[in-house]
Image (cartoon, rainbow, N blue to C red):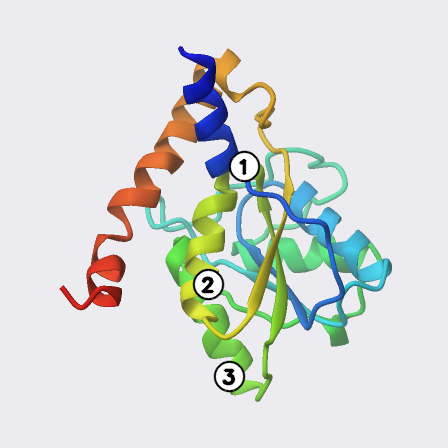
């Protein structure tokens, strides 16, 4: 594939910001503990007083997908992404009082908009936020959390998961499938939003 095409896709999908102090850290759910581990470190480094893990069960299987790595450390019978992430946060030194919970969502759009419901219910005014997510998931997370929190500055602090990074996604079939899948979703999942924005 043409290097310019690879570079353009990479720069679009693999969004990354330098962390800054924010009001809250959001975590769209998955089965990989490296995301809440990263969020725990951001918390301990003083970047945010609050964390909000989000995720219920898979819309495909109707259950939690199971811990992908470090099963010896995170070995409870988790019922949701949120429960799993919360346990990882606590085991990595985050107090329960700093964790909010959203355990009903089944996909990324719901992660963002259900998290908005949680912050509103807690009467929180979110002006700045970090989204900690899979690196190949970064652009779609940014778009959806911006839609859910249009008044906020959203930063992306990603984690490389499943062996996929901005430097190697195009060198392996799995990385190509996941990354180009995200590229497609960043178009087809936002058609209604764009038309609404443009009043079409």
- Tag count: 3
Give coordinates of residue 42: x percent, y percent: 78, 56
Which residue is located at x 61 percent, y 22 percent?
167
Q: Marks 3 and 2, Cα distance to the nearest angstrom?
A: 15 Å
Quadrant including the N terminus: top left
Write the residue at 71% across / 35% down: 70
Q: Do the numbered discs 3 and 2 sit on residues whose CB atoms are within 8 Å? A: no
Q: Closer to the N terminus: mark 3 or mark 2?
A: 3
- Give the crowd class for mark 2: few <14, some 14-19, many >=20 residues within 10 Å: some
The residue singled out by tag 1 in the image is 14
Of 142 and 63, nearer the camera is: 142
The part of the image, by quadrant, that contains residue 85 is bottom right
Label 2, secondary structure: give it.
helix
Q: Residue at x 81, y 52 (%)?
A: 41
Q: Position of residue 102 (x, y in %)?
A: 52, 68
Would residue 81 appear left or right of 182 to someone viewing this image? right
- Mark 2 — residue? 146
**Mark sitting earlier along the chain (3/1):** 1
Q: Is residue 63 left or right of residue 191?
A: right
> Could you tell me which secondary element the residue under label 1 belongs to?
loop
């Amino acid at each position: 594939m043409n290097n310019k095409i690879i570079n353009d896709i990479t720069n679009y999908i693999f969004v990354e910001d330098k962390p800054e102090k924010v009001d809250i850290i959001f975590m769209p759910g998955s089965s990989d503990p490296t995301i809440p581990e990263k969020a725990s470190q951001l918390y301990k480094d003083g970047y945010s007083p609050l964390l909000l893990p989000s995720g219920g069960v898979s819309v495909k299987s109707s259950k939690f997908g199971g811990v992908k790595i470090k099963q010896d450390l995170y070995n409870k019978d988790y019922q949701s992404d949120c429960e799993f992430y919360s346990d990882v946060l606590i085991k990595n030194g985050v107090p329960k009082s700093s964790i909010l919970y959203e355990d009903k969502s089944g996909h990324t759009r719901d992660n963002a908009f259900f998290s908005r419901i949680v912050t509103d219910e807690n009467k929180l005014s979110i002006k700045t936020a970090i989204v900690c997510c899979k690196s190949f998931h970064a652009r779609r997370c940014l778009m959806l959390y911006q839609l859910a929190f249009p008044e906020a500055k959203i930063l992306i602090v990603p984690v490389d998961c499943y062996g996929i990074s901005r430097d190697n996604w195009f060198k392996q079939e799995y990385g190509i499938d996941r990354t180009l899948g995200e590229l497609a979703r960043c178009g087809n999942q936002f058609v209604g939003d764009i038309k609404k924005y443009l009043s079409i």
